[in-house]
Amino acid sequence: MRVYLRRSPVAIYLVSAFLVTYLRLVYRTNRLVHFDSAYADEIAATRTPFIVTCWHGQHFMVPFFQRAGHPSVLMVSRSNDAELNARVVEMLGFDTVRASGGRVRRAAHRKGAVSGLIAMRNHLRAGRSVSMIADIPHGTAREAGMGIINLARMSGAPIVPVAYASSRRFVFENAWDKAALNLPFGHAAFCIGDLIEVPADADEDTMEEQRARLEAVLNRVTKEAESHVETPR
């Protein structure tokens, strides 16, 4: 199926349009039981531009919580398999930067990690907030990579950790990231964690400290979002 989609622009368009319609259905039919909109508005009003982040497999609904036009740029993997993701994001009205990270420097360079970070930094410098996923594709799930920390250091923009959960969801247990497919007609929660800031002169120890802190905050807000929808209502 993935090979067919890569070779057929028409198929990619049709599947992307279906997915956008489905995600909008999920967003509109899940009653939001927790969302600190005042905090979100405060961030948009006082901390723009910023970097929104979440875990792989938990990211499908995050674009629906854009505030005052932020974020407007999302990083999507450069792999052929991610072409569908990029088309969905673009149909939702976002611009994309195609790049992937990695733990091996040569592989990361080949995937466009450096050029991707520079492109994201340039968007931030132009006043556009961005979004990128914290953990590295096909790496260790829910282990924050250093790429987003580097972006925060390069740009001076704060990182905004977020999490979305719905009461009705299907978890792909065999997937490396345990991705959750959110289902319609339930209730949902969107949580925002404490902002993470990385000084421009941060050394390796400080960078690692902030990476670990981001990981902890993301895990905490993910559990918080899940707890809101697992409570009987």
Image (spheres, rainbow, N blue to C red):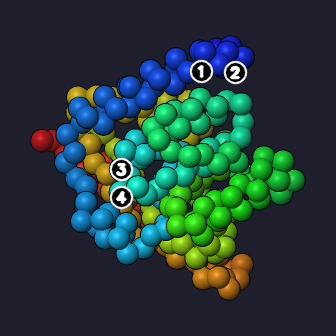
Q: Give the spatial CA distance, label 3 vs label 1.
A: 25 Å
Q: Which residue is mark 2?
A: 6
**Residue 57: % across, % down:** 50, 40
**Residue 49: % across, % down:** 49, 68
How would you rate the neighbour count of disc 3 (Cα within 10 Å): few for under 14, some for 14-19, many for 20 or more?
some
- Image height of 96 relative to 87, above or below: below
Q: Which residue is mark 4?
A: 68
Q: Is residue 71 left or right of residue 12?
A: left
Q: Can see residue 142?
A: no
**Residue 158: % across, % down:** 50, 72
User: Amino acid type of disc 4?
Assistant: Ala
- Image height of 214 relative to 61, above or below: below
Q: Which residue is mark 3?
A: 65
Q: What residue do we see at 64% from left, 31% from top?
A: 83
User: Amino acid type of disc 3?
Assistant: Phe
Q: Give the spatial CA distance, label 1 vs label 4.
A: 30 Å
Q: Give the spatial CA distance, label 2 vs label 4.
A: 34 Å
Q: Which residue is mark 1?
A: 12
**Front: mark 1 or 4:** 4
Sooner in the amino-acid sequence: mark 3 or mark 1: 1
Q: Give the spatial CA distance, label 2 vs label 3.
A: 29 Å
**Residue 139: % across, % down:** 67, 47
Q: Can see residue 22?
A: yes
- Asked which quadrant contains residue 28, the reply is top left
Q: Give the spatial CA distance, label 3 vs label 4.
A: 10 Å
Give the structural element (helix, strand or loop) at label 1: helix
How would you rate the neighbour count of disc 4 (Cα within 10 Å): few for under 14, some for 14-19, many for 20 or more?
few
Q: What residue do we see at 71% from left, 31% from top?
A: 80
